[in-house]
Image (spheres, grey):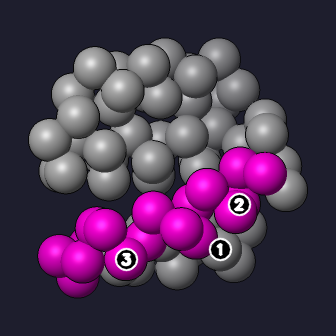
Amino acid sequence: MALNNRAWAYFRWGKAASGMDDVEKSLRLEATSGAAYDTRAHIRQSLGSPDKALADYRLAMTFG
């Protein structure tokens, strides 16, 4: 959870790329975290990967 929160903070500060490592680690530790998939989706979208972002948004809804 802490890693995901830090990744979200990086995203909100306009440093999305810096948050990618944290959110990836978060998902390795808890693969069913809807919040982490949502964070990664936002990061991916902001980095220009809309297809990957959409896949993550769908996973986020699955894991709620």
The spot of residue 4 in percent (x, y) is 60, 66
Res 24 quadrant in image? bottom right
Q: How far apart are marks 2 and 3 (CA)?
A: 14 Å
Establish if 16 lies above or below 40.
Answer: below
Q: Earlier in the sequence, mark 1 or mark 3?
A: 1
Q: Where does label 2 land, which residue?
A: 26
Q: Which of marks 2 and 3 is nearer the N terminus?
A: 3
Q: Where does label 1 land, which residue?
A: 3
7 lies left or right of 17 = right
Highlighted range, magenta: 11-28
**Does the image show residue 11?**
no
* Magenta run includes residue 13: yes
Q: Where does label 3 land, which residue?
A: 18
Mark 3, other Cα within 10 Å: few <14 / some 14–19 / many ≥20: some
What amino acid type is highlighted by mark number 2? Ser
The spot of residue 31 in percent (x, y) is 79, 40
